[in-house]
């Protein structure tokens, strides 16, 4: 087995080294495909051997005698695989030198060179006339519901223009209710209706059980009155509009629907009285301006590069997406200090663009994406292609993506940098190359979610499914009711995603001995009889993301999947069984349950690879066995939510390297606990006070632990429903490293907060939601670096302290009507306070929700 592992590493190194040359050499491409097939067989043999070894440890003597026959079979399989590898070493010159040269190759050098991330801006160039025209349509008075459609070529910027309109202050003021829904090619009518409905009410389980027509009627009743703007982004067919329009009452003349689509017939079907608005191409001048902004961040280009740049832009045919993707290549090839080297690099890209596009001008966008992909370092390629696993227009949580990349083995440990930090660097590089779009941001500026353009997603799917990559395959059901590709084709792929008809798929008894990952976003309850079908069909799974399913019971068979590294699932169970401990290689365990508590019987402290345990319930952790009393769980980084009764010195002593911790229960009990201060690496802490864990009348008075009982390097703290008096802020201001403070759902009670004697020396972000605060006294000395202030549902707050304007760069209000005048005053004071130079460097952003004006 060791010899097979050694041969496997050499072949993997050969694939890595040869990947940059495969497009220039057809013979090499065929060889790489053959090598990859053998690599898959070798990995399968090794993983199967591990499963057999695990089973043998648990078997009786008689079973072990039987098992020896299986072991002999696997040994023969290993020898057969090694025999297949031999020709590559003897006939094709693949040898250890390939591995050694790859280790010192240019990809590795670039990978280790740490540079500040270049996060792209949202550059919307030109088309102001188009935007003004469309906003004009929205402001027109009609006698019935008005539908406006933007149509145009893929990559032309339909969604970008719609987004600009959606965020326009005039539109925000005119339409207090604004809702954005991604429809896409494989939409579900019920999901679209629920996405709109959740803007008006909480989606309960009872609501989920209703039919799509019942939900459509509820939605129609809500939309019958009032002003609203609903954006239906990326509607593919006229039939899709006919399917959805039943929820939109035609009688409401104050309502507007804005549709984006590639096809004019969609627009004509949606509104016979208004022609579709066909989005134009950029002008040559606009194209050049967009290119400069994407590459240099300003409307300027060194004269030495201008000739190459303009020739490259001309090849993009005035298509914004093409310009942005090509610019993403050139950003990485532009050196501020050496124009001669940059000119040479740009010349090569220009020739490459010319070469790629001369063969088939009709596939211009596909060729440009291919060029950008082939310029990616080897380590980024699987990370980029992986985006095709997610449904079209899906908002991808960054934390989820990073944990899945790690579980897939895409991220390699580098020096003292954690896997999570390395993965974050990879994502930021893909964003800087304009292949991925940053979507939502956290309050401290980090990217919380991202998405990918549907043309780029299509490229990822096609490239991943080809004979060379075989990275993943999306399984779909055709109109004829058969799966495409056929179920027998699953044998070829490492990863499967099935976003619809999953129950039919798993009921067909598929068999995927090579499948390492299974992913679905379809929402459904998995029947009891089908629960065991997943582990039976895919014995070598490493990643199982079926959180959108609801399991009727915990799938005990999952614990036989000893290679699992990532599990995300949902149910209503109250106990996590001890057998999970058998999944010794598990990195990430995510469990959503309808139960308020989750008893964890698994021996977490002996799961040495576990990095992240995330549940929405209050988890009761197991007692550690005696053998681990002195040890610690070195890999564990995330733990939450856990119950207050599990907050013991013993637990915190073992989870000594935690970076994120969530606690749910009677938070007052924490005041008696010790051990939090031992978490020297903890950066993020969430405290959710849940008084339902005991009698409210018997609950102790809300209080916080003393400052020295908090983790010493805590940067982010969230308090929810803690009902503390405002004078407890004196404790929080003594947390010397605190940068982000979030107060939610009556975290503090009382009408007056006197913060004049406090000093939050490093606090950059303050978020306050649902408090009874009326008067707030504070000065810039108390909040010297506060940059972002967010206020939500603070209806009684009279004013925001004016002196805070000195450090603020953003102020965001929603349902804080009485405080709007003071927010405007802060905006005026900010403009006066800034010098002209400072104003150029750092503008002030004031956001006031519609309805608060």
Image (spheres, rainbow, N blue to C red):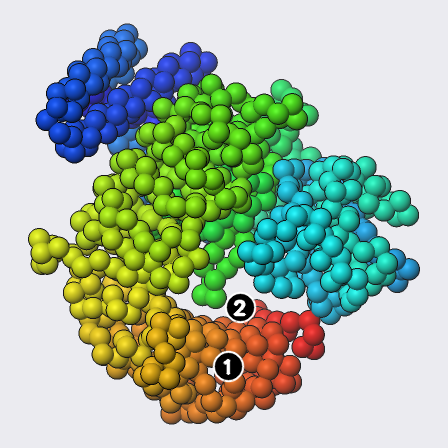
The x and y percentages for residue 840 are 57, 69
Q: Is residue 409 visible?
A: no
The residue identified by callout 2 is: 841
- Mark 2, secondary structure of its residue: helix
Label 2 vs 1, first from the N-terminus: 1
The x and y percentages for residue 820 are 63, 82
Residue at the spot 53% in from the left edge and 31% down from the top edge: 504
Residue at the spot 42% in from the left edge and 73% down from the top edge: 720
Q: Quadrant of the C terminus?
A: bottom right
Q: Nearer the viewer, mark 2 or mark 1?
A: 1
The residue identified by callout 1 is: 771
CB under 8 Å between callouts 2 and 1?
no
- Quadrant of the image occupied by residue 136: bottom right
Q: Is residue 190 visible?
A: yes
Q: Is residue 625 shown above or below 426? A: below
Residue at the spot 20% in from the left edge and 63% down from the top edge: 651
In the picture, measured across the screen, residue 519 lies left or right of residue 660, that is right
Name the one closer to the observer, 443 or 67: 67
The x and y percentages for residue 170 are 75, 67
- Quadrant of the image occupied by residue 753: bottom left
Name the one closer to the observer, 475 or 716: 475
Name the one closer to the observer, 263 or 361: 263
């Amino acid at each position: 087995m060791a010899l097979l592992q050694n041969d496997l590493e050499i072949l993997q190194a050969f694939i890595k080294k040869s990947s940059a040359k495969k497009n220039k050499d057809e013979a090499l491409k065929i060889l790489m495909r053959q090598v990859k097939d053998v690599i898959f067989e070798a990995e399968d043999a090794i993983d199967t051997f591990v499963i057999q070894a695990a089973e043998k440890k648990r078997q009786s003597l008689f079973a072990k005698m039987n098992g020896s026959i299986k072991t002999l079979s696997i040994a023969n399989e290993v020898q057969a695989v090694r025999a297949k590898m031999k020709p590559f070493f003897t006939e094709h010159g693949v040898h250890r030198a390939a591995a050694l040269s790859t280790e010192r190759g240019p990809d590795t050098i670039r990978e280790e060179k740490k540079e500040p991330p270049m996060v792209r801006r949202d550059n919307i160039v030109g088309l102001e006339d188009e935007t003004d025209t469309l906003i004009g349509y929205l402001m027109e008075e009609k006698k019935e519901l008005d539908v406006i459609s933007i149509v145009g070529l893929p990559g032309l910027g339909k969604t970008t223009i719609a987004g600009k309109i959606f965020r326009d202050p005039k539109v925000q003021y005119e339409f207090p209710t604004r809702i954005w829904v991604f429809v896409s090619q494989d939409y579900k009518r019920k999901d679209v209706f629920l996405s709109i409905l959740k803007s008006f009410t909480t989606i309960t389980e009872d609501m989920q059980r209703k039919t799509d027509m019942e939900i459509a009627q509820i939605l129609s009743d809500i939309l019958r009155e009032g002003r609203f703007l609903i954006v239906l982004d990326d509607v593919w067919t006229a039939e899709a509009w006919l399917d959805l329009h039943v929820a939109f009452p035609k009688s409401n003349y104050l309502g507007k629907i804005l549709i984006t689509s590639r096809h004019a017939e969609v627009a004509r079907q949606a509104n016979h009285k208004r022609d579709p608005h066909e989005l134009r191409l950029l002008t040559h001048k606009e194209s050049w301006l967009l290119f400069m902004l994407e590459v240099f961040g300003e409307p300027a280009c060194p004269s030495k590069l201008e000739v190459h740049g303009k020739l490259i832009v001309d090849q993009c045919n005035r298509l914004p997406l093409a310009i942005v993707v090509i610019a993403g290549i050139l950003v990485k090839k532009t050196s501020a200090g050496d124009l001669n080297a940059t000119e040479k690099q740009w010349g090569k890209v220009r020739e490459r663009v010319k070469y790629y596009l001369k063969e088939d001008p009709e596939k211009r966008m596909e060729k440009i994406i291919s060029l950008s992909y082939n310029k990616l370092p080897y380590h980024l390629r699987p990370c980029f292609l992986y985006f095709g696993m997610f449904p079209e227009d899906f908002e991808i949580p960054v934390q989820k993506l990073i944990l899945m990349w790690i579980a897939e083995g895409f991220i390699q440990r580098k020096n003292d940098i954690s896997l999570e930090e390395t993965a974050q660097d990879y994502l930021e590089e893909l964003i800087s190359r304009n292949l991925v779009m940053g979507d939502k941001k956290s309050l401290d500026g980090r990217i919380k979610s991202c998405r990918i353009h549907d043309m780029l997603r299509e490229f990822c799917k096609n490239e991943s499914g080809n004979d060379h990559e075989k990275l993943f395959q999306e399984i779909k059901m055709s109109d004829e009711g058969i799966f495409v590709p056929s179920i027998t084709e699953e044998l070829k792929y490492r990863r499967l995603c099935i976003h619809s008809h999953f129950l039919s798929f798993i009921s067909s008894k598929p068999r995927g001995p090579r499948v390492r990952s299974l992913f679905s976003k379809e929402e459904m309850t998995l029947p009891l009889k089908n629960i065991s079908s997943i582990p039976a069909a895919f014995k070598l799974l490493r990643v199982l993301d079926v959180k959108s399913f609801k399991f009727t019971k915990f799938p005990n068979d999952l614990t036989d999947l000893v290679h699992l590294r990532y599990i995300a699932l949902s149910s209503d169970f109250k106990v996590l069984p001890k057998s999970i401990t058998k999944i010794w290689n598990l990195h990430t365990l995510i469990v959503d349950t309808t139960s308020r508590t989750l008893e964890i019987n698994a021996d977490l402290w002996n799961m040495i690879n576990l990095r992240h345990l995330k549940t929405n319930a209050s988890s009761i952790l197991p007692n550690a066995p005696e053998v681990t009393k002195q040890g610690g769980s070195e890999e564990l980084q995330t733990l939450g939510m856990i119950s207050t009764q599990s907050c013991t010195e013993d637990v915190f002593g073992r989870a000594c390297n935690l970076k994120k911790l969530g606690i749910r229960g009677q938070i007052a009990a924490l005041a008696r606990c010790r051990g939090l201060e031992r978490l020297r690496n903890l950066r993020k802490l969430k405290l959710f006070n849940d008084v339902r864990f005991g009698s409210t009348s018997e609950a102790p008075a809300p209080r916080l632990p003393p400052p020295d009982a908090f983790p010493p390097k805590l940067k982010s703290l969230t308090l929810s429903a803690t009902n503390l008096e405002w004078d407890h802020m004196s404790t929080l201001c003594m947390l010397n490293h605190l940068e982000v403070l979030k107060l939610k759902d009556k975290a503090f009670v009382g009408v007056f907060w006197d913060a004049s004697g406090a000093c939050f020396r490093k606090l950059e972000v303050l978020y306050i939601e649902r408090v009874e605060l009326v008067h707030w006294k504070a000065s810039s000395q108390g909040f010297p670096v506060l940059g972002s202030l967010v206020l939500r549902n603070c209806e009684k707050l009279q004013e925001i302290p004016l002196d805070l304007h000195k450090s603020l760069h953003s102020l965001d209000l929603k349902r804080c009507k009485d405080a709007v005048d003071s927010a405007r005053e802060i905006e005026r004071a900010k403009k006066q306070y800034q010098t002209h130079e400072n104003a150029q460097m750092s503008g002030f952003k004031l956001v006031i929700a519609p309805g608060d004006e």
